[in-house]
Image (spheres, rainbow, N blue to C red):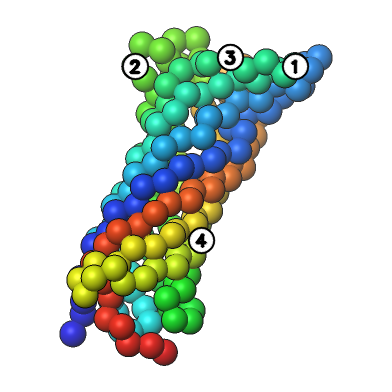
Amino acid sequence: MAQLLVEARVGATVTSDLVEDVIVDEITVAPRVAPSVAVAIGTRLDANHAVAVDGGWSRSDLESRAAGDATRVLALTVWTASVSIRRRLIGDLWARGTIGALKYAPAGDEREGTLFQEEAPLRPMVGIGARYERGLTSALAVGVDVGWDLHRFTTQSLRADGFDGESTVHRLTVAVTVGRRHDRARP
């Protein structure tokens, strides 16, 4: 019989540069380290495999950096939705593969004159992750989760300003997880 999987993750996300250009000095645009929250609901397929639907949120300031100075551009929220397949590696160590989408949601009136002026892009993403979890009680497990994902990035405003192509953006999230304890069966 399949077992319901329910969990919450709270952590921090580091994102690589969304945009990089060189005029005289290098100029980059990237979010600062962002607090992040995610939830997952899924099912255990057997003692070693699970599938889940994940939703996540993070929010921080988008910064432009040039010649060692950082300037706040706007507040930036990132929403994610994905499906993950999980596999127990050994004991309490799990790995996962993820496919989904990421939506940039900049603050409303701050968008004017920025790379998000004309749109807030929805981008496909893929990722991998690992987690170590331990039973806290007979019904509750806690753990540490590390996830990495990547997606391509551009906006209509960037294209209109002559930036052709897309950047590959990497995101790394480290989080603490709390969720329903899984069946303790081992491979």
Residue 9 vertical position relative to residue 107 in the rendered view, above or below: below
Label 1 amino acid? Ala
Kindly check if marks 4 and 2 are in contact, taking CB atoms under 8 A apart as contact. Answer: no
Label 4 amino acid? Ile
Q: What residue sits 48% from the left and 42% below the top? A: 13
Q: What residue sits 60% from the left and 38% below the top? A: 16
- Give the mark nearer the N terminus: 1 vs 2: 1
Q: Which residue is mark 2?
A: 108
Label 3 amino acid? Thr
* 39 left or right of 90 in image: left
Does residue 97 appear in the picture of this structure?
no
Q: Which residue is mark 1?
A: 67
Give the foreground label among 3 and 2.
3
Give the foreground label among 1 and 4.
1
- Give the mark nearer the N terminus: 1 vs 4: 1
Q: Residues within 10 Å of mark 2 (few under 14, many from 20)?
A: few
